[in-house]
Amino acid sequence: MHRHNLFLTYLALALAVVFWGFSFVATKIALLGFTPFTLVFLRFAAASIFFLLLLRRYRLPRLTNRQRGQLAVLAVFQPGLYFAFETIGLQYTSATTTSLIIATIPVTVLVLSMLFLKERLRPVNALGVAISLAGVALLIFGGGDAGGLEGSLFGDLLIFGAVFSAAIYMIITRRLGQSIAPLQITAMQIIFGAVIFFPLFLRDLPRMQWQSIPANSLIALVALTLFATIGAFFCYNYALSRIPAARAAVCINAIPLVTTFGAWLLLGEQLSPLQGAGGIVVLGAVYLANYQPPPPALAMEAVVLDQE
């Protein structure tokens, strides 16, 4: 890959990580004024209008019926199941814990790639997968509030549903990105997402109290739409079309750092010592699970440079 394109790819990944890192905090704030599926539908409905206007401006190749079907399946997992699990789960667990569980996505991508794509797993990668389970256990059971464990556990399990949905999305997108433009993938994801969440929005509508929505919830909704929905999806799909899914997924492990800072700054959240240790274990395990030794030629070159 050309150096300029490589820079753009990792810049897009970095922006997606920052947008998604703050999205957990913004979602917690937005849920103070919106019901879960009202929030998700409004995000995707507004983003759909943006992408429909964008698709009209840029003349892209027409999608075949098969490609539309594949994109519809993709939308069921992301944003469909992913946002259903994440938004409901955030009502029962903290933004920081959520982001640390989301950091297990790269490990999940590796395992699913091994099971369904028959990709081989090195021993060091398998060790990372095993260690990540210990880190996840510390995250779930290491909270200081034992009395709230049941609710927190329910929320954590929902977030794990989001993890598996996101992992399946990454594997599918990697394949689709070879034949469909990132803009088309993102646009169809968002549009199908709005369609998926519309019936759930209608179900939530009678519970909405529009006159009492706080200003910070409205600001959070706008930020989620512009950055976490439009910006992050486009940036990540662009990167997935240029590098393997497992390598792109590794960057997900930087999300907890962004979320922890944002949750501390805006929500006053803190991790217990055991949960902090679990987060460190998870991040280290993700690195091991995705470790790729350098090719022999590069390793020999590095040795020569060290000797000089």
Image: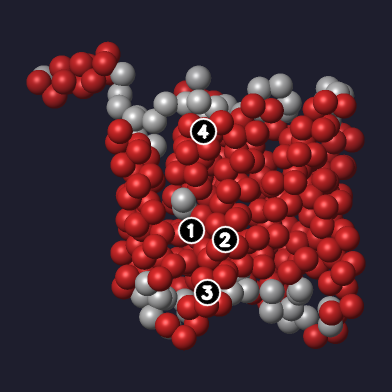
Question: To which residue does mark 4 refer?
Answer: 115
Q: Nearer the viewer, residue 26 or 276?
A: 276
Question: To which residue does mark 2 refer?
Answer: 159
Above or below, 5 relative to 12: above
Query: Mark 4 or 3, which is nearer the eye?
Result: 4
Q: Residue at x 26, y 16 (%)?
A: 296
- Crowding near the residue tagged with mark 2, few <14, some 14–19, many ≥20 C-alpha atoms within 10 Å: many
Question: To which residue does mark 3 refer?
Answer: 152
Asked if one can make out residue 184 in the rendered structure from this viewpoint, the answer is no
Q: Residue at x 47, y 38 (%)?
A: 111
Q: CA distance from mark 4 to mark 2?
A: 22 Å
- Crowding near the residue tagged with mark 1, few <14, some 14–19, many ≥20 C-alpha atoms within 10 Å: many
Above or below, 306 relative to 101: above
Q: Residue at x 30, y 24 (%)?
A: 294
- Crowding near the residue tagged with mark 3, few <14, some 14–19, many ≥20 C-alpha atoms within 10 Å: many
Say whether marks 2 and 1 touch (CB < 8 Å): yes
Earlier along the polypeptide chain: callout 2 or callout 1? 1
Q: Secondary structure at mark 3?
A: helix
Query: Mark 4 or 1, which is nearer the eye?
Result: 4
Question: Residue 307 occupies which quadrant of the picture?
Answer: top left
Q: CA distance from mark 2 to mark 3?
A: 11 Å
Question: Residue 238 occupies which quadrant of the picture?
Answer: top right
Earlier along the polypeptide chain: callout 4 or callout 2? 4
Question: To which residue does mark 1 refer?
Answer: 101
Q: CA distance from mark 2 to mark 1?
A: 7 Å
- Which amino acid type is marked by label 1? Ile
In the displayed structure, does residue 217 sit left or right of residue 97?
right
Earlier along the polypeptide chain: callout 4 or callout 3? 4
Say whether marks 4 and 2 touch (CB < 8 Å): no
- Which amino acid type is marked by label 2? Ile
